[in-house]
Amino acid sequence: MKWNVSLRELLAIVVLPLVLGTSTANAQRAAKPRADIELPPMSYTCPMHPDVLEADPGPCPICKMNLVAVRLVSIWTCPVHSVITEQKAGKCPIDHRDLIQVTVALSWTCTGRSDVNQLTPGKCPDGTDTLVKYTPRPHGNHNPQHGGQFFMAPDNWHHLEGALPRAGFMRVYLYDDFSKPLPLDQARRVQGRIVTNETIDPQTRMPTEVAFPLSLTRDGRAMEARVDARTLPARLTAKLKFKSDGPEYRFDFAFDSFSKDPVTAVATTAGSTSKGGGTTTRTPATKGTPGAPSTAIATITTAGSDANTSNPDFNAAGNPNNQIEVAIPDTVEEMVRAVSTRNERIRDLIERGSFAEIYVPAFEAKELALAIDAHSAQLEPKTQATAQLAVKQLVRSAWLLDSFGDLGNRAQIVEAYQTFGAAVSILQELFPTAK
């Protein structure tokens, strides 16, 4: 399974892949024996360019080095105490906060043997069973830590979280690629402002802003600004440079309520799946399409080697082992109707500024579109060609919506949605009864 060059170039530029990090002794999760782990699919990454993640072995498209194999898996861990690793949602046994879902590299090792790092279980030199090892990796944790909204910077390294703890005051937390607080020497280089109103002069095309400077807090973990936004909902934009000679990045935030830091729970509720503190994690979407019969369930695995095998051209690195399940209706008309429902959901999320939630209906629509494509042979030749083009357009723009949703740039999201919506309109015209 190979991706064509043009799409690979598109994904490398726009669809930010999840980056794999180098294992270090102090970065590894505590090893433990596990005999019941289902092996996740193999993915391949570049030793020199961890932003490259492919479905098949081969040369790195950047430096031509041979890609190396890795297995990616999602686990649940404590927001602060990362030594805890669980297989399902619940409460942290140390501070009783809700566990968060993160992506890690899965391998097997032996006690006291840092040189043993296998991708399949086996035996150690002393005859004992190998132990499971979870290694944190860049971009494996995109959970808000302060009840705000979490975005990844376009440089594919920095991360930030915008929070509005009270009226007239915004805080921007700064993180590295492991979602750890940015080192103080790097945080001091960051320059930024919060824009509460922005207009474009129709003649000069130059922007006019109402902006408030961000200043670094004493501990260096965040930047703060006093702003004129005192009512909800609030729409605020952070414009940041992570170094003086670097590019300026834009992050659009939408607050319907004030941000609240997660509170350490007093009592422990086993198996709890509450989100707590305003944070969200990517969990499977509800099966089925309301009101539509189905004969199949498509499981969308946005990762690694066998994601979206019905259409290899559209494989890409996304969110490893976070699965979205969607019912596939019986007829093409019903499929298009289900796509239309997701289209309306995406439009509503964009209007509300809930960018981090866009990926769910986008990927559901993508899988439904691929199901439509699988039935296109039943159509008239002219209709078939038009439908296939619309499906291709929808699938590409769905990946862009997911990527831009992570970046938090409203303009990019709106532009990708225009392409997505146009593809949906084409399918609706081809199948009028599906409207």
Image (spheres, helix red, strand yellow):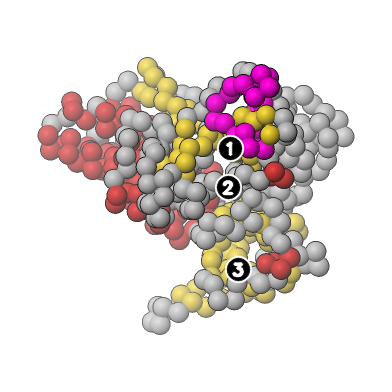
Whether pointer 3 and pointer 2 mark residues with C-beta atoms closer than 8 Å, the reply is no
| Residue range (magenta) | 114-134
Kindly report the distance in space between the C-alpha atoms of the residues bearing marks 3 and 1: 28 Å
Q: Which residue is mark 2?
A: 21
Q: Residue furthest right?
A: 266
At x 75%, y 57%, the residue is 165
Along the polypeptide, which appears first: circle 3 or circle 1?
A: 1
Residue 242 is tagged as 3
Q: Which residue is mark 1?
A: 105
Percent position of residue 172, x then y: 68, 61
Percent position of residue 280, x then y: 64, 41
Whether pointer 1 and pointer 2 mark residues with C-beta atoms closer than 8 Å, the reply is yes
Q: Amino acid at mark 2?
A: Gly
Q: Amino acid at mark 3?
A: Phe
Kindly report the distance in space between the C-alpha atoms of the residues bearing marks 3 and 2: 21 Å
Residue 370 is tagged as none
Q: Amino acid at mark 1?
A: Ala
Q: Secondary structure at mark 1?
A: strand
